[in-house]
Image (tube, rainbow, N blue to C red):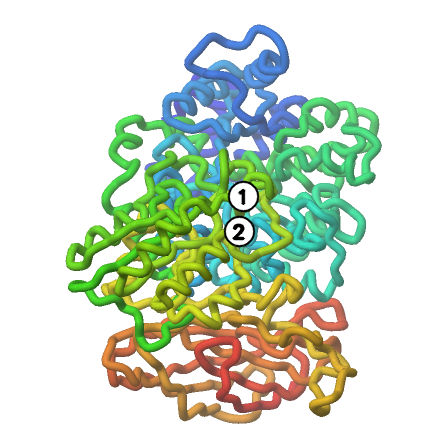
């Protein structure tokens, strides 16, 4: 059924005619899949032929929600103007409008009151869940479990789609090396290979088969956003073409190849040109080299921000730059709707560029099935039945447990005994039901997370004693300037010390509030905020038998804890089921298998720090008194905890590294195998990691690069052989020839449980 389109004679005739040209098998459409591309393209082109210039530009205009749609229509001011644009068909998408009732009301205006009745896209930041919240994406990356990550995205998509949404501004696939940058919590860490695999998993999870339980994905931020100087959000980015192509772009390419329907450009400049106006990124690479046929949306207000950058003199020129560069949809700058039609008439923007942008946007709407049923996502019964399903809570609990990384476990203090002990639990975060939701959980309700205390109380064999110790933040944690961090109040220290003195074991829940990371929340110091480090040391003096559980959205500098505290658990911000996940790991009902997706620095002076760095001309120390080599005089070059690192309640031994041949030839492949033995009495999982080092090349190459991994279950006492395949694609990179290719040369192979893998072999590639 074609709903509103039947009342528009031209469109009705158009769709009937095009439908009749399909084969007999297509008379009854399969609504779980997008229609064949050729038919969609023909329909899109036919609609374009009916549209005015202003209507085409309207598809390129996105507005934030601007009035209570259940109340009267706005009569004056900016809201009234937006409302008038909506009724004219000059709006292609809305964001931050959610809930079936509101979405349906707006969609009804678009499809039943405008001239052509073109449906709207409804976008929202479904970053790690909608109502039922999964771990932050950086935590999910620590699982190295692609199926679990895909399932997490499916859960978020299902809940959001049931609430009327059809588009998410995720996944964020920025490779990030600087933990000061607040948005590291939103991505997959420092490695382009791991980031690429996660990008694929999340795109597939969000988009699925384009059913009413799926959302259009949006790969962001294109490109280089995470390389902001000094880790300060929105700051300048100045990188080489080598870094752009070999480090930053691979996850974006993976997302495009996985079928992501949309991309979002970024706030930063690249080579002096803001990304929103950067034709090299959007037209040459994305739509040219990669043949991406979806559309590009700007980030919030980024078109207008080109004025602040000093690249555009006013909004009209900013719109001109953006349109000519290939930015298809304007999010909240109002540049296109105000100026683009005039720019076309003045000859400053070719109408073909407007046609291309509108075509791409209409095509996505067809792919989502909105022309077949504009109210596809507007079922109030489905909304009630879907939100908060038990299966979703089970799913995010599973994801949360898999995201936890065991950093230290001296004397096997973990797992905890389940009975007969007095356990002191210290830290304001232990009793917090909002912070575990993390940043970017805007669809969730405060106070809906399971706290650590609630999770621990599920185990009733031990006596629990709680003491807050100290608040992390004072006042409203939405604002996290230093004045809002608790730098002075130590009034709870004495209670914490007393609780620790009488306990067999102390669990301290310390770290960042969930809203101390995320957009606009960069930090120049990345240790434990406020007085928490002092609290940790005071409690340690009273009872050193401490399990430190970190809640955080970025790598932290914890050198004192690493040296003194016997057990450290990286528990991130784990979402709705946070407390249950942490308790199940602490008590051993789940054996941790997570591995770090970002290196943990020893101090902030090492930042940015990452495992896949380059050698310098003086990479090693020549003697104990030598100073003329690349190093610090006050700290080791190495990180506190390296990329890929993570312990388990099992122990694993690597041996018998074999390579099928030491000669890789053009068109061929070689295999690398290693034996991994579980030397403990506990069944576990190990992330077996393969790294390569290209020793000599046309441009310098990293000392190691992740090129494969396997999350492998291994029973107690069992030995498993894990095998990897290496071919030309594995060793290809962006060379001095300005293209991706494999170069002849010598390679080292490393296999192990982290980026510090010790087992090595070698091979040579010849063309």
Mark seen at residue 485: 1
Q: Residue 610: image x %, image y %?
A: 60, 68
| Quadrant of the rendered image containing residue 326 | top right
Q: Secondary structure at mark 1?
A: loop
Alpha-carbon span between mark 2 and mark 1: 7 Å
Mark seen at residue 529: 2
Closer to the chain start, of discs 2 and 1, is: 1
375 is higher (above) or lower (below) than 22: above
Q: Looking at the rendering, in which quadrant would you find the N terminus?
A: top left
Looking at this view, is 332 or 635 the one in front? 635
Residue 75 seen in render: yes
Bin the neighbour count of mark 2 within 10 Å (Cα to Cα): few under 14, some 14-19, many 20 and up.
many
Q: Residue 689: image x %, image y %?
A: 46, 76
Q: Secondary structure at mark 2?
A: loop
Left or right of 267 in this view: 217? left
Mark seen at residue 208: none
| Quadrant of the rendered image containing residue 615 | bottom right
Bin the neighbour count of mark 1 within 10 Å (Cα to Cα): few under 14, some 14-19, many 20 and up.
many
Residue 153 seen in render: no
Q: Residue 165: image x %, image y %?
A: 43, 33
Is label 2 in contact with label 1 (beta carbons under 8 Å)?
yes
689 is higher (above) or lower (below) than 575: below
Looking at this view, is 183 or 28 the one in front? 183
Left or right of 255 in this view: 3? left
Looking at this view, is 354 or 585 the one in front? 585
Q: At x 67% / y 40%, what residue is drawn?
A: 327
Looking at this view, is 680 or 33 the one in front? 680
Q: Residue 522: image x %, image y %?
A: 61, 48
Q: At x 56% / y 41%, what residue is drawn?
A: 480
């Amino acid at each position: 059924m074609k709903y509103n389109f039947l009342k528009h004679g031209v469109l009705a005739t158009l769709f009937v005619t095009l439908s009749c040209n399909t084969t007999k098998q297509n008379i009854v459409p399969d609504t779980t899949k997008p229609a064949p591309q050729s038919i969609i393209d023909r329909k899109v082109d036919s609609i374009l032929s009916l549209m005015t210039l202003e209507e085409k530009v309207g598809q390129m205009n996105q507005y934030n929600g601007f009035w209570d749609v259940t109340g009267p229509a706005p009569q004056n001011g900016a809201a009234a103007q937006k409302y008038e644009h909506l009724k004219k068909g000059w709006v292609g998408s809305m964001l931050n409008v959610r809930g079936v009732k509101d979405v349906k009301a707006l969609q009804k205006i678009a499809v039943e009151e405008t001239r052509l009745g073109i449906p709207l896209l409804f976008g929202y930041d479904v970053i790690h869940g909608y109502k039922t919240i999964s771990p932050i994406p950086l935590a999910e990356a620590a699982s190295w479990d692609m199926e679990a990550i895909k399932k997490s995205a499916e859960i978020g998509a299902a809940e959001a789609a049931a609430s009327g949404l059809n588009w998410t501004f995720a996944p964020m696939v920025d490779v990030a090396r600087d933990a000061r940058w607040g948005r590291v919590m939103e991505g997959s860490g420092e490695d382009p290979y791991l980031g690429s695999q996660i990008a694929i998993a999340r795109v597939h999870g969000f988009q699925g088969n384009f059913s009413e339980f799926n959302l259009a994905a949006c790969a962001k931020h294109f490109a280089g956003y995470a390389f902001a100087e000094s880790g300060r959000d929105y700051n300048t980015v100045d990188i080489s073409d080598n870094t752009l192509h070999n480090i930053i772009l691979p996850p974006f390419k993976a997302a495009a190849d996985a079928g992501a329907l949309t991309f979002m450009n970024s706030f930063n400049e690249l080579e002096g040109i803001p990304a929103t106006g950067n034709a090299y990124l959007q037209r040459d690479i994305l739509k040219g080299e990669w043949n991406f046929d979806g559309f590009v949306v700007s980030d919030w207000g980024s078109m207008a921000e080109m004025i602040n950058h000093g690249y555009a003199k006013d909004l009209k020129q900013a719109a001109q730059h953006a349109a000519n560069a290939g930015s298809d949809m304007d999010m909240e700058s109002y540049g296109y709707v105000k100026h683009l039609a005039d720019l076309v008439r003045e000859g400053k923007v070719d109408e073909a560029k407007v046609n291309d942008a509108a075509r791409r946007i209409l095509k996505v709407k067809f792919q989502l099935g909105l022309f077949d049923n504009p109210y596809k996502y507007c079922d109030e019964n489905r909304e009630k039945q879907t939100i908060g399903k038990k299966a979703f809570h089970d799913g995010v609990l599973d994801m949360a447990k898999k995201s936890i990384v065991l950093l230290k476990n001296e004397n096997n203090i973990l797992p905890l005994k389940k009975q007969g002990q007095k356990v002191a639990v210290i830290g304001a975060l232990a009793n917090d039901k909002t912070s575990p939701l993390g940043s970017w959980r805007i669809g969730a309700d405060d106070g809906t997370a399971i706290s650590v205390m609630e999770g621990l109380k599920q185990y009733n064999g031990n006596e629990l004693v709680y003491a807050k110790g100290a608040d992390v933040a004072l006042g409203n944690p939405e604002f996290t300037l230093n004045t809002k961090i608790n730098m002075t109040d130590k009034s709870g220290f004495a209670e914490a010390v007393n609780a620790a003195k009488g306990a067999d074991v102390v669990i301290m829940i310390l770290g960042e509030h969930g809203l101390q990371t995320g957009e606009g929340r960069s930090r120049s110091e990345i240790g434990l905020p406020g007085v928490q480090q002092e609290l940790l040391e005071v409690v340690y003096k009273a009872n050193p038998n401490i399990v430190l559980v970190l809640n955080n959205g970025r790598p932290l500098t914890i050198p004192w804890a690493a040296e003194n505290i016997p057990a450290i658990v990286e528990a991130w911000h784990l979402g709705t089921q946070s407390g249950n996940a942490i308790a199940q790991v602490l008590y051993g009902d789940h054996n941790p298998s997570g591995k770090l997706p970002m290196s943990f620095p020893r101090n902030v002076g090492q930042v940015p720090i990452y495992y896949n760095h380059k050698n310098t001309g003086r990479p090693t120390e020549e003697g104990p008194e030598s100073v003329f080599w690349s190093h610090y005089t006050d700290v080791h070059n190495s990180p506190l905890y390296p990329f890929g690192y993570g312990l388990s309640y099992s122990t694993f031994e690597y041996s018998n590294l074999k390579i099928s041949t030491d000669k890789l030839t053009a068109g061929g492949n070689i295999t690398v195998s290693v034996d991994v033995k579980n030397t403990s009495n506990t069944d576990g999982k190990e992330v077996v990691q393969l790294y390569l080092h290209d020793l000599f090349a046309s441009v310098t190459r990293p000392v190691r690069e992740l090129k494969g991994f396997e999350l492998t279950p291994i029973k107690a006492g069992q030995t498993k052989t894990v095998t990897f395949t290496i071919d030309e694609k594995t060793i290809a990179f962006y060379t001095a020839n300005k293209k991706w290719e494999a170069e002849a040369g010598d390679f080292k192979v490393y296999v192990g449980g982290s980026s510090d893998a010790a087992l090595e072999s070698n091979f040579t590639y010849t063309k």
